[in-house]
Image: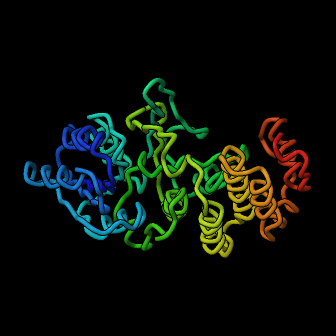
Amino acid sequence: MKKISVIIPVYNVEKYLYRCVDSVLGQTYYNIEVILIDDGSTDSSSEICDEYQKRDKRVKVIHKKNSGAASSRNIGLSNAKGDYIAFIDSDDYIELDMYENMMKINEEYNCDIVLCDCYKENKNTREVFTHNIREGYYNKEMLYKEYFPTLLMTNSVNYPPTISNCVCLFNKILLDSHQIFYKDGLRFSEDLLFGAQAMYYANSFFYMKNNYYYHYMYNPTSVTNVFYKNKWMIMKQLHIEIEKFFLFLKDYNFQRQVDLVLLFIVYHCIDNIKTSALDKKIKEKEIKNILENIDVCNMFSRIKINSLNISWKLKIITFIYKYRIKALFYL
């Protein structure tokens, strides 16, 4: 029976950690190792991790100074002994038969990556999160034809399926042979680069559509969803890393998708500024700095707004941003 290494970065999640780890240790697929990377927690998360290590021999705990989720996942990857790699965020949890069902697909199709769907939840609501691609098996040729057109970003300016690495099961040989790791220093959407690189190199892939095994707990106060002073600079660095890799490939032209990634970042960062408590003049200055960035200007010169699969309101907003119509920034 092949082993799955489940990598869980942990930082100040004492309220949710039991639920998360219990959902992994309770899997009907028993042959797993759980790697808990305590990222310098200041609550009781560190002690909870140690408690699990004493209780179950499948659990390994690594304590380190705080340096972010990307660094924690990389340490997990370096210590993983399994044949397959899975990731879970420590405030989320999974269905007890998730890995058994995903491994059944692996046994039949021997895939590099298996993907399922998830629920997006908070205290009061639950919505299903699925992907606009067909279910089933893809070989390399199918990936080129059907998946690569939305590998980095869809035409509706939404992230592709592999942005959430937590709904994927990765063959460790795939990751090791191409030295796929998380980019240290990225604090937002670090999954995108990792997942897109893995999918680019994959020779086979299976999508388990409408199988909602993962529970993503949406937290409006998380680092991704609150105002963050340097968010534009950090997310722009993500775009630079994506450019470095995908614009120099010779077998596929990813220019449009790289542009769409930057457009998504512009939307996200400006919305983040507009909903913040900053003074209006400071907001306008921050927005102006983004829209006058040379890469943003070049992106807007290549993007045809009418070709985007977005609402008319968002098309108008995109037009305002493209031509930097200051009076209408808050539309």
Viewport quadrant of the C terminus: top right
Residue at 85% x, 61% y: name it. 302
Q: Is residue 238 above or below residue 100?
A: below
In the image, taking residue 216 as reference, residue 146 lies left or right, namely right
Q: Is residue 185 above or below residue 321?
A: below
Q: Position of residue 78 (x, y in %)?
A: 30, 70
Q: Is residue 212 above or below residue 162?
A: above
- Along the line of sight, the residue nearer the viewer: 12 or 108: 12
- Along the line of sight, the residue nearer the viewer: 125 or 285: 285
In the image, taking residue 200 as reference, residue 294 lies left or right, namely right
Q: Quadrant of residue 21?
A: top left
Residue at 30% x, 40% y: name it. 16
- Along the line of sight, the residue nearer the viewer: 139 or 123: 123
Residue at 53% x, 35% y: name it. 130
Q: Position of residue 169 (x, y in %)?
A: 38, 51
In the image, taking residue 250 as reference, residue 193 lies left or right, namely left
Q: Is residue 210 above or below residue 83?
A: above
In the image, taking residue 30 as reference, residue 13 lies left or right, namely right
The figure's colour scheme reads: rainbow
Q: Position of residue 306 (x, y in %)?
A: 88, 45
Count numbered badges in the picture.
0
**In the current view of this chain or complex, which residue is farthest to the front?**
279
Q: Position of residue 254 (x, y in %)?
A: 70, 63
Residue at 84% x, 52% y: name it. 321
